[in-house]
Image (spheres, grey):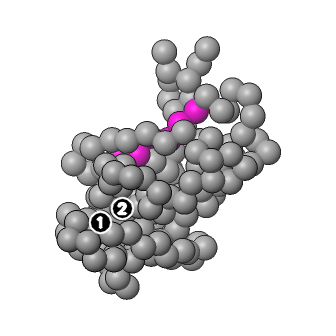
Amino acid sequence: MSFRWFILVSAFSLCVASAQDLTVNGTVMKAADLAEMPRETVSIPDQDGTEVHYEGVPLREILKRAGVPLGKELRGKALASYILAKAHDGYEVVFSLGEIDATFGNESILVADKRDGKPLFGYQGPFRLVCPNDKAGARSVRMLETLELVRIQK
């Protein structure tokens, strides 16, 4: 059995998100907020085998800003939590906090807003999760709208 644990970290949490926003645990993050955060670039092969370069903010940085327990706070019951990533078209995937945290799995997962130096187009964006270490691309959620912390109760 699980329940959803929402963290409200700013007055923006009551705002209605637009197509250019990302909702993280009830907090609306604008594209401008993400542009000011630490950025990285990752390269992955495209379907035709060419190299594609995505630029964006590491997922762990966004989660830290939203108050998600990481680092020294990721102990005990917090380890039985996961991030539910939701896309505009209803697609959903899950990431454990342990795989994201730098002291555990240290997965490099990016919330990208650019591809090859240009903003993501149409069905790709405005945000996309990019998981360069996944062997299959199924968790690279396009049209990303929401990141939600879910804590499992035992």
The range drawn in magenta is 81-86
Counting labels gives 2
Residue 12: x and y in percent read 51, 56
- The amino acid marked with disc number 1 is Gly
Q: Which residue is mark 1?
A: 125
Q: Which residue is mark 2?
A: 128
Near-viewer residue (20 or 68): 68
Q: Residue at x 59, y 72 (%)?
A: 37
Q: Is residue 120 magenta?
A: no
Q: Quadrant of residue 128?
A: bottom left
Residue 121: x and y in percent read 23, 73
Q: Residue at x 54, y 60 (%)?
A: 108
Is residue 19 shown left or right of residue 15?
left
Residue 61: x and y in percent read 61, 61
Near-viewer residue (24 or 143): 143
Q: Looking at this rendering, what residue extends furthest in the right direction?
A: 72
Is residue 14 shown left or right of residue 138?
right
Is residue 24 shown left or right of residue 9?
left
- The amino acid marked with disc number 2 is Arg
Q: Quadrant of residue 153?
A: top right
> Is residue 18 something one can see in this rendering?
no
- How crowded pointer 2 is (Cα within 10 Å; few <14, some 14-19, many 20+) is rated as many
> Is residue 57 something one can see in this rendering?
yes
User: Which quarter of the rendering shows the C terminus?
Assistant: top right
- Tell me: residue 3, above or below residue 31: above
